[in-house]
Amino acid sequence: MRPVVPPLTRIRRKLVFLTLLAAFLILLPLSIFYAIGYRYDFTQPNPAITVTGAFYVFTDSPQAEIFVNDQRIENARTFRRAFYIQGLPPGVHRVHVQIPGMHTWVKELPITPHLVTEMEAFNVPLVPIVRYIPAYETADGRAVIPATASTTPSFFLASSSLLYTITTSTATRTLAINQEYRLLDELFLEKASTTAVLRAFEGVHHATTSSTSLSVATTTKERDGLRVYEQNGDIIVERLNQGEEPPHYFCHTAQAIEISVEEMDTYGTSTIPSRVPVESSECRTTIRMDRQGKKVHDFDFHPETPNLLLLQLDDGLYVVEIDDRTWQNSQPLYRGTTFEFILYRGGVFIKEGDAIFEVALQRTEG
Amino acid sequence: MKEKDTHRRVSLSKRGEKVYTRFYHCMNQETPRRLPYAERPDFHVGRATDLEGRQRLFYRFLEIVPGVASWGTLIGVVLLSIYVPFVAAYFVIAFALYWVLKTAFLSYHLRYNWKRLRHHMSLDWKNMVDRFSYGHLYHVVILPFYKEPREVVVASLEALKNVRYDSKKIIVVLAAEERAGDGAADILAQMHERYKDTFGHFLTTVHPADLPGEMAGKGSNASYAAEEVRTRILDPLRISYEEVLVSIFDIDTVLYPDYFNCLVWHFMTAENPLKSSFQPVPIFNNNIWDVPAISRVVAMSSTFWEMIQQERPERMATFSSHSVSFKALYEVGYWQKNMVSEDSRIFWNLLIANNGAYKVIPLSYPVSMDANGAPTLIQTFIQIYKQHRRWTYGVENLCYLLYHFTKNSAMPRRQRLALAFQQAEGYWSLVTNPIMLFILGWAPIFLGGQDFHQTVLSYNLPIMVRDLLILAMFGLVVSSVISLTLIPARPEGYSRFQYLVMAVQWIMIPATMIIFSAIPGLDAQTRLMLGKYMGFWVTPKNRES
């Protein structure tokens, strides 16, 4: 049997130490350069070090597929429900987020070296998904829809998995009153009367109290440091709390971006308008919403995020993003011409005629 | 000097050849004395208040330095993240990379010592020492105890009784504390009755309470016991101090059968056996199957650290159970009686008193001790925390050695500088590294401001740190495997599922490093910094099997 084993010799330990020290001295600058965006592209015919930037895309759906310049991004690192796509060369890149059965969200944004361009994608169902809220129910809980309704609600054109009965009878003694319908009906009535009061109040208030007022708002909504109001027919989003960090889309300024030679064929010009990041001290305070030349009948924040608005335009209810870099994505949530909507407990409810129903904001699984 | 008796000492040359050295044992030896440096009035300083004047101020300054350095580092990282987040981010990346490589470096040492340990445990040490003439050697085993249960004491003595060594050459000292009360006194009487004829001598001592200048604790008790041994056994029997090896064990220490043979082998082959301490590897196996997973992880981590240190003997100080010649002990006045971490302090006493010509010899042979376990999980957590706070209060030794390094110019300067740096770095990194790595690594991301937040660096920072930490965690696989080889066989009645738990439990390492290492260390350093000196806290022993 071997005799006792001595401890590691100092020479051997020193050798290991020096090897690891050398590894540290080599890896550290490489790590830092990688971390700040430098990349060495081995796949290029003439490999060179390039300075890159990144996209950071928020999306609510786990089924979302991210494409940059029409190439699907695989294994993009994920933070919570976001995609981080790094190693992108400077220039304008097209990002689109698609989900089966949903509208596609598209954005073209520039990549700035060493910087991350954030964006929030959203996808609304192609076919509106509604949940009809009947005024009455049968004893076994089945919704009852009167066939004598003066108008055919548009939701008949939408998707619903609710079982319902159409009745020609006007007798309701044998039916159960749906309390949810009653509550929502009252909320709609309340909103109608409140809006009228607010219109009167704010019209007087702004005329008599504000000497520098730029707007005479019909209604004003505030949420998470943002205020939305109507001004001369336009919807304006104003940033409150100037001292706090603003949403990223406020901190850009318009600038013509030079594009590559290949892209000139597409755009027919050497530069395209875009927005580039600015210092935090230069962030804007207001953004005007794109109402597509239509009249805005009503508006509110999206229940799930302050970065989206619900705009009721002439032909329907739209989800519109506040982020106005390049363009503002707008996706129809519900099409119709004569309806009202309210937000209640995180849901969007529509009243069309006597019918009330909830519109799904995203597609459920299955 | 009259030649009375001679014996050969065998050592190994660099080529592994046996070298026989004859030396002489003098009959009329001079009475051993304290070393000159140990005669200094400040040699056994425990805290600044033990000194006067400028020395006191200087020592107080040294007590403040570790806490300031640690807090300064932690606060500095936060401030750096706020005001210069880019620099903070670069520092975090560099630190994470350093951590990975350091883990690899330490893991290399750990694996080597693991192989060495297993090999040493397989050797027939009895056979190996038989080539020496060592019959003249005595072993004094000091077992200080306080209020530990009777069964803990019995287990240690039974293990001692069953070692593969001539028990008549073992002098056992069961050292009780007067302030422990009648319970301890009863145990003393029972153990004396039971073991008085088992060993060469079985001495029981009762350390008086409230002696002036002493802090209640293991150091004062052990020193009292050592002096009792000298006056009641060694001197009357004219046993030379050079021929006595003192082993001080915690009362829960269970010896492996060949401990003394292994110790004798290392003593007989050491270059300067009387200027060396001998350090075994503490493995907390006595109750490893009975304690919670968190306790096992913490205990095994301590074992691993000692195993790593065994491969770096020039950095070692003694820890917990260890052995040393009585002569060396006597020359420095035994263990200090006025401070907490007497197990490490004795080494620094010996090193400084011998002007740097003293070292620790790693035995790479285990002794088994108790892991922390209490009746409830919360109590276990508290006990582990307090124990580690006491261990990390060993930072008081840094103050001691820095103080005496400025006083003892006979010690080589290079050695002083190297040791000062190693010890300072050790106490600083113990406290700051886990916190910086697992908590403050995210500081630039949260505190960096918007201009930093929109950079690629701020997004890549958590990804890189996470990936580097995952890389470092591969070392846990090694730890897991090694720990499974060191634990005793599964007792009857314990599920095989426990093996899986023991393998997976290492996932708790990030949490234990912070909660039971860094934070108690910071607690201890802060107390020292503020002058809130700690006393000795006795770890309660609870053993089910």
Image: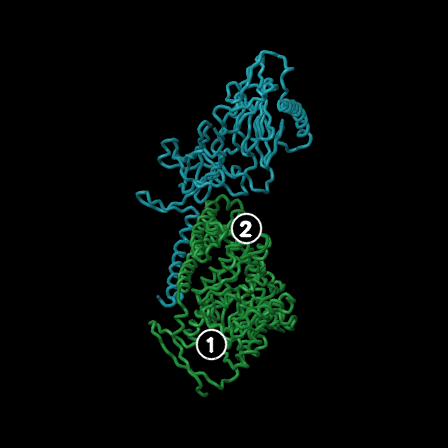
Dot 2 falls on a residue whose secondary structure is helix
Q: Which residue is mark 2?
A: B82
- Relative height, residue A178 to residue B505 (above, below): above
Seen from the viewer's position, the closer of residues B42 and A193 is B42
Q: Is residue A266 left or right of residue A142?
A: left
Is A186 above or below relative to A149?
below
Count of marks, rendered view: 2
Name the residue that disc number 1 marks.
Answer: B137
Q: Amino acid at mark 1?
A: Leu
| Residue B414: percent from left, percent from top | 45, 71
> Do circles 1 and 2 both sit on a common chain?
yes
Q: Is residue B405 visible?
A: no
Binning the other alpha carbons within 10 Å of mark 2 as few (below 14), some (14 to 19) or many (20 upward) gives: some
Q: Disc 1 and disc 2: Cα gap in Å?
A: 64 Å
Label 1 marks a residue whose chain is B
Residue in front for this viewpoint, B229 or A213:
B229
Q: Quick check: A49 left or right of A354?
A: left
**On what subunit does the disc labeled 2 rest?**
B
| Picture residue at 50% right of the left edge, 41% below the top | A278
**Upstream in sequence: badge 1 or badge 2:** 2
* Residue appearing at x 53%, y 74% in the figure: B201
What hue represents chain A? Answer: cyan
